[in-house]
Amino acid sequence: MADGVHLSLRIIDAIEGRLRPLVGPRVLRVVYQLGYPVLRVWWLAARPRVTGVKAVVRCGEQVLLVRHTYGKAGRWDVPGGFLRGGEQTDETMRRELAEELGVEPVSARVIARTASRHDHKRETRVTYVADLADTEVHPSAAEIAEARWFPRDALPGAATAFARQMIARAYWDPRLLARPAAAG
């Protein structure tokens, strides 16, 4: 793990990099669906330390949730992925949003750094809030089963607890906690 990226993630990148130009999104989707359970078994044995990035994508009062084609495919979540060698978390966030949704945020900032043991990985998860200029997205057919905009205060029942927590945090304004000036 010389560059901070676990071997399993480097292998995934190498396989995906070779397959993507050779096969269409439908075949790649099947590869993701078959590969994910294999990775979970590997992660159970290896317990890798990884850094993941998630993004609460918003446009005004709307938030974008995705259902992935693999993993918890029925659940709505915020998009994200893992660092590649040499990347900083903001680069990963922008790359993942471009790959998964075909979007470029007009602004972004970190809203959380959390520890996670999801799928047996020891993960440091960095979460961003990313603002878009409009709601046009182009989801990757290989990775994203569905992408949909929701009002921030009307999330679907199948939204993950993590997505709900981060969306609430993305709209939290610390200025609301400031004490009002004393009347003079």
Image (cartoon, grey):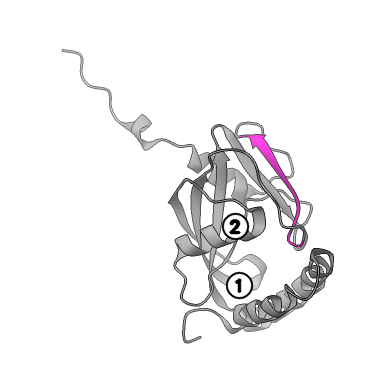
Residue 129 vs residue 105, the one in the foreground:
105
Which quarter of the image is occupied by the C terminus? Answer: top left
Which amino acid, mark 1? Lys
**Rendering coords of residue 3 (x, y %):** 46, 82
Residue with the mark numbered 1: 121
Residue 144 relative to residue 53: left or right: right
Residue with the mark numbered 2: 98
Residue 32 vs residue 71, the one in the foreground:
32
Give the secondary structure at mark 2: helix
* Residue at 72% over, 38% down: 156
Asked whether 158 falls inside the magenta stretch, the response is: no
Residue 168 relative to residue 183: left or right: right
Query: Where is 2 relative to 175, above or below?
Result: below
Which amino acid, mark 2? Ala
Query: Where is 37 relative to 169, above or below?
Result: below
Task: Identify the magenta region.
Answer: 142-151
**Rendering coords of residue 175 (x, y %):** 34, 33
Label 2 vs label 1, nearer the camera? 2
* Residue at 56% over, 80% down: 6
